Amino acid sequence: MNDGTKPPEPSRRKFLNWLLGTSVGGLMLAMGFPVSRYLIPPEAAESATATVRLPFKPEEIPPNTAKIFKFGNRPGILVRTPAGELRAFSATCTHLACTVQYREELGHIWCACHNGHFDLTGQNIAGPPPRPLEAFVVNETADQIVVSKGA
Amino acid sequence: MRFGFKGAPLLGLSLILVWSQTAVAQSEQDSCSTCHRVLPDERLSAPAEQFSDDIHATKGFICIACHGGDATIVGPAAMDPAKGYIGAPQRQQVPALCGRCHSNAQFMRRFNPALRVDQVVEFETSVHGQRLLSDGDPNVATCTDCHTAHSIKPVSDPRSSVHPLRVPATCGGCHADAERMARYDIPTDQLDLYQTSIHWETISEGGDLSAPTCNDCHGNHGAAPPGLSWVGNVCAQCHSMMAELFSESRHSRVFALLGNPGCATCHRNHDIHPASDEMLGLGEGAVCANCHSADDQGGQTAGALRMAIDSLRTTTEEAHSILLRAENSGMEVSQALFALNGAQDALVKARATIHSFDVEQVNAEVGAGLEIVTEVRSRGEQALSDLRLRRVWLAVSVVIIVALIVGLVMKIREMEHGGGRI
Amino acid sequence: MLARPNWLGDREWLGDVWKWLDARLGLSYVQQIAKKKDVPVHRHTIWYYLGGMTLFLFMLQVATGVLLLFYYRPSAEEAYESIQFLMAEVEFGWLVRSIHAWAANLMILTVFIHLFSVLLLKAYRSPREITWLSGVALLGLSITFGFTGYLLPWNELAYFATRVGTEIIGVVPFVGSFFLSVLRGGTDVSGATLTRFYAIHVALLPAAAAIFLGLHLFLVQKHGMSIPDSAEGGDGKGRAMPFFPNFLLRDLIGWLSVFAIIAALAAFFPAELGVKADPFQPAPVGIKPEWYFMFMFQSLKYLPPHILFMEGEVVGVFAFGLAGVLLLLVPFLDRRSIRGERERLFIWLGIAAIAFIIVLTILGYTANPTQ
């Protein structure tokens, strides 16, 4: 423009600058948005291969009760024994893969599908289950419980 | 052939006890096996060879504990009937011979306190025992037929003839022998049938030794066919849920009246195969159709039950495939997949409830499952429609990129047709 | 000096920033180089864009690769699960991974086209021999990037393709089995292989690529664009356009188009994960290598079991090794071009190589796998 040639019409030039500016900004947004969302850690804090942090606190589970939690795509069961100890097992019944539950009046784990019984060490004690429940390792701190697969 | 010693007096229990108590001391002077091992006749040498890793040998017993005689004397003089030598005991004698120790709680406590001491009593109630001891039929099984005579091992030893993996072959050794069974007029296909069953598969391939083999249903020492009316109790040892439902159902009473063998009426006895949905209803492979037809009320109930189960199964499968499709496209459906476990549970439960033959009970389970499936399915479909949202995002980005490209093209034109650099 | 570039416009503060930076970074020197750089304009100018396109795709790979590293875990136990997590739980995880996968394939494609365009236009002639050598090295690095990256998701397809792919190294006599075990980290493809491939993919190769890429770009800058004989203006008097901004803006248009294409591919055909690798399962039917290995894979299939006294496969592997060496040495073998004479032989050889690759690749995808 300073070399003496005819400058383009100002309105056209204005539009062009607007178009370039806006689309560059749009592109930045279109790339920046996914990237920033990508970097935000997802709710499930880790891939559930071997460890899961439970979504409830230790005080929410009184003695002689249990809670079912999600361990990968399968359920786990966290039991607080009448003595106050926390134990975790796979909640998948070893017979036909139903989800087991804790029976407070029996004081042990029970599968409703075929009346299978497991004691508080996960051993199959009655009914059709052929094997004990897989036991997990429980780590308890003041405000969280972490369950992991045994070594 | 039998190496019998006819007319040998049965010695008093107390005398034999004295022998066996001194067994450990005697083992240093075991002239029986010293000689028998080197005898050229295999019938005489093999027992001495085999006995070396028999459970009794490892506990310190030697030949004379059962055969009598005096092992401190070398030569035929050791086998003096006056010294209690009985030779090979007769088949009818064997239970009493084993029972001298194995029925004696006080004695057994010194070696294996947990071992039961009622085997001989049980044996006397068994078909084998009655035929052998009361009817004097020497061809039926006595202790040594199942446990062997000279290589007896504990049940837990995989080499043992009574280890769960080897029980079918041990029983089948006689029961699958058509010639031997001919005179008793009983079938000989039980072993073959059993080996096609889910129970044998669970033991032999699944490695679960607690699954039932012959003795778990028939009893071991008290072996007998379960009675028609109580076969259900035997199955209920493990399958308690179904047994309970069945016992309260109308079939339980009708089967008893008709003389049908409870569970085995539909599931068979030896060739028990995994239960499948096809067994239900009136179609091909349906056991209900053995008695019922579409015209009677039972047939209609069977059809309704099958329909209920099928509806839950197919909808669960559909929901699962929708979720998998969504997951493969990178949508987050793990919670929904997790929830679908509940539907699978309901299906298993509904299948168990079939044994009540009550449409309402089954429908209650199926309904609970269908509720979960409907909810999960809608979440899967939601995920798939979110997937379409991606294409919208893509379109927006492409529009932006195209706008930028147009802008750049115009810029280049302006620059170059304008005749100079900016 | 201190020439303030026109494109900054007439805002005062920008000029001050420029001055400040220039005094410290020597920006005007860079600007002078950029100003001087011209791109010849002739009927083959289009091929000049391929190098830049490859560079853009490489940068895209670096960016998405770094993002993937945020979530990836390099172990046989966790690799598959971490990608599953990335695809299902991480927002836009599918997008980042799909872009990485698609851009990788496109980059190998552009590298091949770039290489063959340079070969056919004889852009390797003196003094650009080292530019050629570094370019061939970059091709090798790109292919190795592809091969090592393919295993990282630890799915069934990748596992078995890697098993077959690495086996070829074992064919080489004497040293083959040694290199095979070094590469695999054991006798078979295992978790140890995965960590090795990971180290190669994210550390070794990027470092090597940075060195060769730096050399390559420096040499391109130093020698300028080669003008083919067949093009008008081969005598140096032809038309030209300034690299900055005319050629760069055109480059940008190409990059943006490729970016849009990749985004569309990612949205419509997201990278799949398949099932987790299980070393104890039999190989699934129809294991195929990635498309850029297909021509080699397929040619090895057509070789007879024995050629003279050697195994057919060994001969094939040697032939490809020899072809690679010949490719590398083209600038030194093309003697007549060195003397400035016209030489058609190497052009025909290049065309034959392209035809061979295309035909065998097509055969690889259409021929009956049991033959």
Image (spheres, helix red, strand yellow):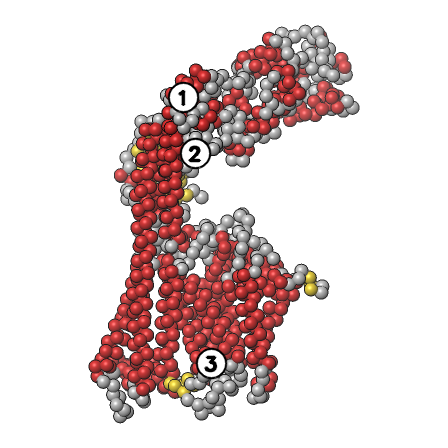
Residue A95 visible from this viewpoint: no
Vertical placement of A127 versus C41: above or below?
Answer: above
Residue B251 shows which numbered tag? 1
- Tag 2: residue type? Asp
Q: Are marks 2 and 1 on the same chain?
A: yes
User: Which residue, given by chain and number where applicable, does mark 3 sit on?
Assistant: C219
Q: Of the residues shown, which amino acid type is indicated by label 1?
A: His
- Position of C103 with respect to B372 (left or right) is right
- Residue B400 visible to an observer of this rendering: yes
Indicate the position of residue C343 as horizontal and vertical percent values. 58, 84
Q: The numbered mark 3 sits on a residue in which chain? A: C
| Residue C127 image point, x, y percent | 52, 84
Report how far apart the C-alphas of labels 3 and 1 lie in the structure: 91 Å
**Circle 2 residue:** B277
Front residue (pair B317, C103): B317
| Quarter of the image with the N terminus of chain C in it | bottom left
Total labels: the figure holds: 3
Q: Position of residue B74 (x, y in %)?
A: 75, 17
